[in-house]
Amino acid sequence: MNDSERKAYLKAVGSYCKEQRIKQDVTLADLAYIADVSEDYIERFENGEIDMPLDKVVLLTHFLNIPFEKLSEIHLEIIENKKK
């Protein structure tokens, strides 16, 4: 994955997690507590500004009932869009 794909992936994953969090009425504070990080850290992750360690991503996606496979789907979408 090159740098531009990585940035697009981080932004897409963060955005998707934020969308799911809001749909499920979960707060930034809830996710921060689960991942043992600050609310600011979660917000920056949701905005695609930082790369979160895999163990924390797994915790958050599990808490939000996001199948881990969805992260692969997002990556494939980015690759496909780049080809167009």
Image: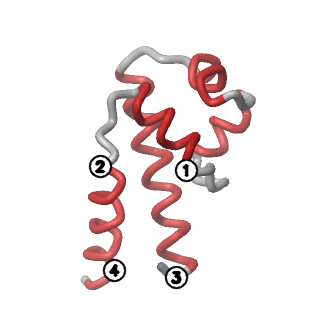
> SS for tag 2?
helix
Q: Is residue 33 above or below residue 60?
A: above
Q: Residues within 10 Å of mark 4 (few under 14, many from 20)?
A: few
The residue at which mark 1 appears reads as 54
Q: Residue at x 32, y 59 (%)?
A: 72
| Distance in Å between CA atoms under marks 2 and 1 | 14 Å
Q: Nearer the viewer, mark 2 or mark 4?
A: 2
The residue at which mark 3 appears reads as 2
**What amino acid type is highlighted by mark number 2?**
Lys
| Distance in Å between CA atoms under marks 3 and 4 | 11 Å
Q: Residues within 10 Å of mark 2 (few under 14, many from 20)?
A: few
Q: Nearer the viewer, mark 1 or mark 3?
A: 1
Looking at the figure, which quarter contains the C terminus? bottom left
Q: Residue at x 65, y 25 (%)?
A: 32
Q: At which x and y percent is residue 54?
A: 55, 50
The numbered mark, 2 or 4, whose residue comes first in the sequence reads 2
Q: Pointers 3 and 4 in contact (CB under 8 A)?
A: no
